[in-house]
Amino acid sequence: MFQNFDSVDALLINKKKGRSFYTGKPVYKLVFQTKLGILNFEVDEDCFHCVEVGYKGLLKADGSKLISFGKWIESPIMPVTTSELSWLQF
């Protein structure tokens, strides 16, 4: 699986909407075809609705967390440097 914000070209091949067995809350998943095989990511509702099956783009992820996909999904999540945490006392 992905580590440290890896990226790969991807094709969105399916979108799945369901309900959590435990909480009953909606669950949204995007399914991508890549050279690494088929990858699934759970996303929020906004991300789910901003893409369509057939979209192609660069997919970036950190482990099982989708970071971005092409020009459609751009996450504000970026690695935090220690200089950005200078206010934090250890």
Image (spheres, rainbow, N blue to C red):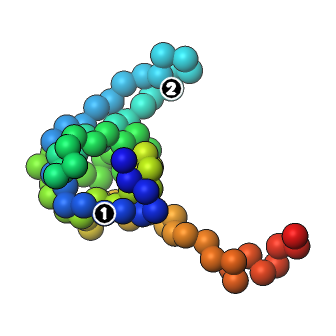
Query: Which quadrant does the C terminus fall into?
Result: bottom right
Q: Which residue is mark 1?
A: 7
Callout 2: few (<14), some (14-19), or many (20+) C-alpha neighbours within 10 Å? few
Which numbered disc, 1 or 2, marks the residue that appears first in the sequence?
A: 1
Counting from the top left corner in percent of width and height, residue 34 is at: 18, 50
Picture residue at 44% right of the left edge, 50% below the top: 63
**What residue is at 43 percent from the left and 45 percent from the top?**
64
Observer-nearest residue: 80 or 21? Answer: 80
As drawn, 71 above or below 64: below
Drawn side of residue 69 relative to residue 81, left or right: left
Q: Residue furthest top?
A: 21
Q: Residue at x 50, y 26 (%)?
A: 25
How packed mark 1 is, by other alpha carbons closer than 10 Å (few <14, some 14-19, many 20 or more), is some
Going 44% across and 29% down the picture, which residue do you hit?
26
Q: Please tell me which residue lies in front, 7 or 18.
A: 7
Relative placement, left or right, of 22 versus 15 is: right
Residue 54 location, x and y as percent? 11, 49
Judged by depth in the image, the label closer to the viewer, 1 or 2, is 1
Task: Provide residue 41's location: percent of width, then percent of height.
Answer: 36, 42
Q: Which residue is mark 2?
A: 25
Give, as a three-letter code, the residue at label 2: Lys
Above or below, 8 against 54 in this view is below
From this viewpoint, which residue is outermost toward the left? Answer: 54
> Could you say which disc has been placed on residue 87 in the image?
none
For the residues labelled 1 and 2, say whether their Cβ atoms are less than 8 Å apart: no
Q: Quadrant of residue 13?
A: top left
In the visual, does 75 lie left or right of 50? right
